[in-house]
Amino acid sequence: MENVLIGRIEPYFRHPDHDVLKVGDRSVACKNVRQVLTWLGLSRHSGDDPLLFDPPLFQSVKNFQENSGHRNVDGRVGPGTRTLLATRLFKSSGLSKLSELDGSEVKVLPTVFISYAWLDTHPVEKLEQWLRDHNVEVIRDSESFVGGQDIKEAIRTAVLKADKVLAIWSLNSSQREWPIFEQYISEEVERQTRTRQLIYVRLDDTPLKATDPHRLAIDARTRTLKQVGDDILKTLGFSVERTRVDYDPDEPIGVGAV
């Protein structure tokens, strides 16, 4: 579980054009490395250009490598040092500090895992297509789980990989074993990462669980697919390029849609 989450942090420290950060490089990754080392008490902001890998940052990275017992104390940020940085950050604050770093320049599509009941497949398929057409990667059981794979472990891995979990909430899903289990796993991951990951998408008037009065719930009962999708994009916090789509975005997504 921890390895998957650390893998989500590492791109923040990677140059978009090459694998090892070194003196003279200029990148958002340099700024992020400096910021994390500052949080760890091993660096301070230096120079006029926070994006520049300057000699003081080189020395801070060397100090970090030596402090961590890294085999290469060379002042450069390669795969091993990225993993060390991501691990230290995760152990100190989960994923909660990622919002304070600049977005990675390494292109990674935002990812959502959709938890739903089989009886709600029709609106889920419309929502999935809309998200994919807006460059969001979607994980769903029908396409993402490998045959013969332990289903509980597959769900856990999917939740860990996702930036957000969309719990499609309805009378159907509120009474089904797998959606309930997926929500439980999502809440477990939230506790470990110290982030809010689970979001409800309400298809009907079924009351939300009493234990989640402050949980974000996107209303899809009478609103259009475009309105619901736009709300989901906002929760992801990504600037997502819009593309032409072959459906009516003003068609309702909730109960009663044909």
Image (cartoon, helix red, strand yellow):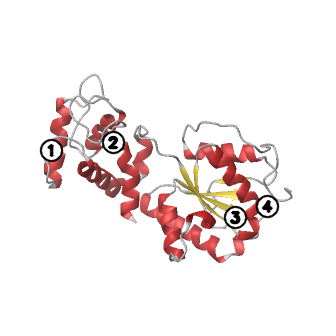
Q: Which residue is mark 3?
A: 208
Count neighbours of disc 2 (C-alpha within 10 A) and say few if under 14, some if 14 to 19, many if 20 or more. Answer: many
Q: Pointer 2 and pointer 3: residues touching (CB < 8 Å)?
A: no
Q: Which residue is mark 1?
A: 63
Label 1 residue SS? helix
Going 17% across and 48% down the picture, which residue do you hit?
65
Label 2 to label 4: alpha-carbon separation: 44 Å
Instruction: Give the amino acid at mark 1.
Output: Asn
- Sooner in the amino-acid sequence: mark 2 or mark 4: 2
Instruction: Give the amino acid at mark 3.
Output: Leu
- For residue 202, say whether it is visible: no
Label 3 to label 1: alpha-carbon separation: 50 Å
Residue 196 horizontal/vertical position (percent)? 52, 55
Residue 80 horizontal/vertical position (percent)? 24, 52
Q: Residue furthest top?
A: 48
Q: Which residue is mark 4?
A: 204
**Tag in front: 2 or 1:** 2
Q: Which residue is mark 2?
A: 14
Closer to us: 102 or 96: 102
Instruction: Give the amino acid at mark 2.
Output: Arg
Count neighbours of disc 4 (C-alpha within 10 A) and say few if under 14, some if 14 to 19, many if 20 or more. Answer: some
Instruction: Give the amino acid at mark 4.
Output: Asp
**Tag in front: 4 or 3:** 4
Count neighbours of disc 1 (C-alpha within 10 A) and say few if under 14, some if 14 to 19, many if 20 or more. Answer: some
Say above or below: 122 vs 225.
Answer: below
**Tag in front: 2 or 3:** 2
- Sooner in the amino-acid sequence: mark 4 or mark 1: 1
- Sooner in the amino-acid sequence: mark 2 or mark 3: 2
